[in-house]
Image (cartoon, rainbow, N blue to C red):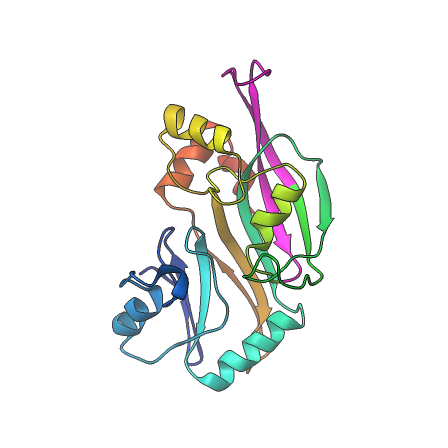
Amino acid sequence: MEILYEDAELLAVNKPAGLLVHKSKIASDETDFLLERIKEQAGANLYLAHRLDRATSGVLLLAKSREIAGEIGRAFMAREVVKKYLAVVRGWPAAEGEIDYPLPGVREHGPRKPALTRWRTLATATVPIAMGRYPEQRYALVEASPETGRYRQIRKHFHHVSHHIVGDTSHGRGDHNRLWRIHFGMHRMLLHAWRLEFAHPLSGAKLTLVAPVDAVWRSVLERFGWVDATTV
């Protein structure tokens, strides 16, 4: 597991896409979990400070004690942690904007809670492949910054505004997912937890953790000439 940061209280890893973070009733037959892997690798007990979907790659923060995990958790709840994700979406969104749309929890018909995601468009591309009534398809690379942490928030919010995330089999567009599978060999969701910015729970020093994209993401960025768009 690629370690992005480590000190006496915290450890951050670059989570691979497709790996469950921890045991879940949703995937009761699964036996491979990030938390178990990193505990064995680090030779220590670790506690999740937050979570990522199975299909999402990127920065995952863990704590070396329950107390520190609690402090980080409170910072997330208080919106003191800046979260930035990279996503490839269908269509060309506006240069920037926000999606303010309440979402339920894991149970789709449960009570809805306030949810806010801000985004900015980093780059766009046109694919000369006809589909439906359109002779070509438009896609964009966006930076999404969820202010809240609802279940599958980014995926559901971009679905809500019809800029579905490419490769999202639950909330995306099947026709566009098929196009990417057939023409680009893409068999996963293009959502990456790119950056976390927060104050260290003990020292108060500002930390900025950045997760490099993997080979699949790099191939997409290179194909569409988007590499420079992710240089910060």
Residue drawn at x 44%, y 55% as measured from the top left: 58
Q: Is residue 15 found inside the magenta-colored segment of the image?
A: no
Q: Is residue 166 left or right of residue 6?
A: right
Residue 16 seen in this snapshot: yes
Front in this rendered view, residue 153 or 113: 113
- Position of residue 173 in the picture relative to residue 186 (left or right): right
Return the residue found at the far bottom: 67
Depth check: give the residue in front, 165 or 25: 25
**Residue 7 image point, x, y percent:** 42, 76
**Magenta-span inclusion, residue 122:** yes
Asked which quadrant contains residue 5, the reply is: bottom left
- For the record, the magenta segment spans 121-148
The quarter in which the N terminus is drawn is bottom left
**Residue appearing at x 50%, y 68% in the figure:** 50
Which of 137 and 41 lies nearest the eye of the viewer?
137
Locate residue 116: give its quadrant: bottom right
Report if residue 201 is visible in the image.
Answer: no
Task: Count all numbered tags in the image, as a single digit.
Answer: 0
Q: Percent from the top left, x then y, of residue 216?
A: 37, 39
Q: What percent of the width, then of the height, locates residue 146?
A: 63, 56
What secondary structure characterizes most of the magenta part?
A: strand
Horizontal and vertical percent for residue 206? 59, 69
205 relative position to 29: left or right = right
The image quadrant of residue 89 is: top right
Name the foreground residue: 11 vs 30: 30
| Residue located 71% across and 41% down the image | 96
